Amino acid sequence: MKYIPVIGLEIHTELKTESKMFCACANNPDEKSPNTNICPICMGHPGTLPTINKKAVEAVLRLGIAIGGAISRKSHFDRKSYFYPDLPKGYQISQYDAPFVEGGVLEGVKIKRIHLEEDVASSKHSDGKEENYTFVDFNRAGVPLMELVTEPDIKDGEQALRFGKELQRIMRCLNISDADMEKGQMRVEVNISLMKEKDKEWGTKVEIKNLNSFRAVAGSIDYEIKRQSELLDSGEKVIQETRGWNDQKGTTVSQRTKESAHDYRYFPEPDLPELTFTEEYLKSLKASLPELPEEKRKRFSEEFNLSQHQIDDLLDDQHGAIYFEEAVSELKEKIESANIQLLFNYLTSDLRGIAKTRGKDMREINIPPEHFAHLIFLIQNGTLSSRIAKDLLLKMEETGSDPETLIKEGGIQFMGDEESLIPIVQEIIEKNEKAVADYKKGKGSSIAFLVGQAMGKTKGQADPEKLRELFKQELGKI
Ligand SMILES: [Zn+2]
């Protein structure tokens, strides 16, 4: 390649705290009614004084420790002055020269810094049909916002995607943010330029903003590498600008060319004290960290023999992972050679499907892991067909009952055993001379007809595969 991509990310994340960064207003991203969670402090009234949200500071420190960054023992907040309608005070409280965290590595990408600041209000533009208005909702103003900046270590879209996903998993695991990109809780900006390989000359930097999925992050990077390479190949220049992502077309589009650099006039926030973190405090934070995704990955691979892909699936569904572990331990109590793959498959397809249609996460589903494990046990030992299991799972969610109780109450019979199925198979064979004759003549499809008849007879409670097998066996005797 003639050019070396130089790519860095800036990731803003809204922290999941009870209250805002510098006042007692609720931090509620789901609040639909505008300008509800506001007070004189977050509205920037003169004479008000901010206080620091300890939980938000702790969240940044915990992430810093989790990614192996260096924590500043002394730090402070700064004022970043600029004028914009979504910024009530005329300045944002942020951190400039003393971020809480410097360094650290994730997915082979070095972290430059992680600091804490406050979010701004959200603005909504009227559709312009009558008059043009911009509405400003201050519910978000003052919400704790963490900014993570990487070194320009990233080489392509795929690496950026892996980095973003792993960061998201860690933040969810630490319970510091839901980090939902579609909801704007995690916002990724890309800085990208191409360096000429032969003279190592730096290229012009392009920013890509408003990316609301990891797919968009990866897609925009790969597109920009191609676009900028083609420009340089044809002797043209890359313009310094901000671009957005068109999801339908899969291209980046110019949004605005770079205005003159802002002078933010940073200076230490005089209304807030300097922060000092003792070694004991940082040690206690470190000790309180939960099992992190990388550790979990290793353990899940060793304990459950799942593939990396399967493990990542569980890591992306935190409550699903907890559910999985509990269900596996229940299943192991019932049967020594527990079929963990079977449990994983039912959990990630049927059970998760039910949870989704009910609008629940795996923590809220009305089936305790013990009942789910029992169902898997009944499938594993051949008592239940997959068809009945699916229906039963739905009933279990509706009633909260265990599968045995439902089977007894609902008159669902144990149809998996050959003893009860063989008489039915024999009866169907006797009653359907023509189909049997056709089968004997080599018409294979006749067996499907016979299985259908038997399914009708058992009210769909038998396993069609088992029936097919028994028909072959019984027809072979004729
Ligand atoms: Zn407030």
Image: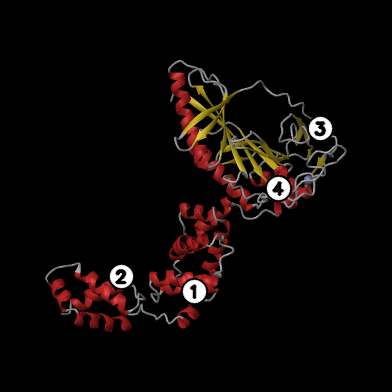
Q: In this view, does 323 lie above or below 108?
A: below
Say whether mark 3 is within 8 Å of ligand 1: no
Q: Can residue 122 be seen in this view?
A: yes
Q: Calculate the distance from the C-alpha at mark 1 to the C-alpha at mark 4.
A: 39 Å
Residue 188 location, quadrant: top right
Of all residues shown, which one is farthest toward the left? 441
Marks counted in the figure total: 4
Q: Earlier in the sequence, mark 1 or mark 4?
A: 4
**Residue at point 68%, 51% (across, down):** 31
Q: Name the residue under label 1.
A: 374
Q: Mark 2 points at which residue?
A: 465
Mark carried by residue 268: 3
Q: In this view, does 251 lie above or below 165?
A: above
Q: How is the image coloured?
A: secondary structure
Say whether mark 2 is within 8 Å of ligand 1: no
Quarter of the image where the C terminus is located: bottom left
Q: Residues within 10 Å of mark 4 (few under 14, many from 20)?
A: many
Of all residues shown, which one is farthest toward the right? 47
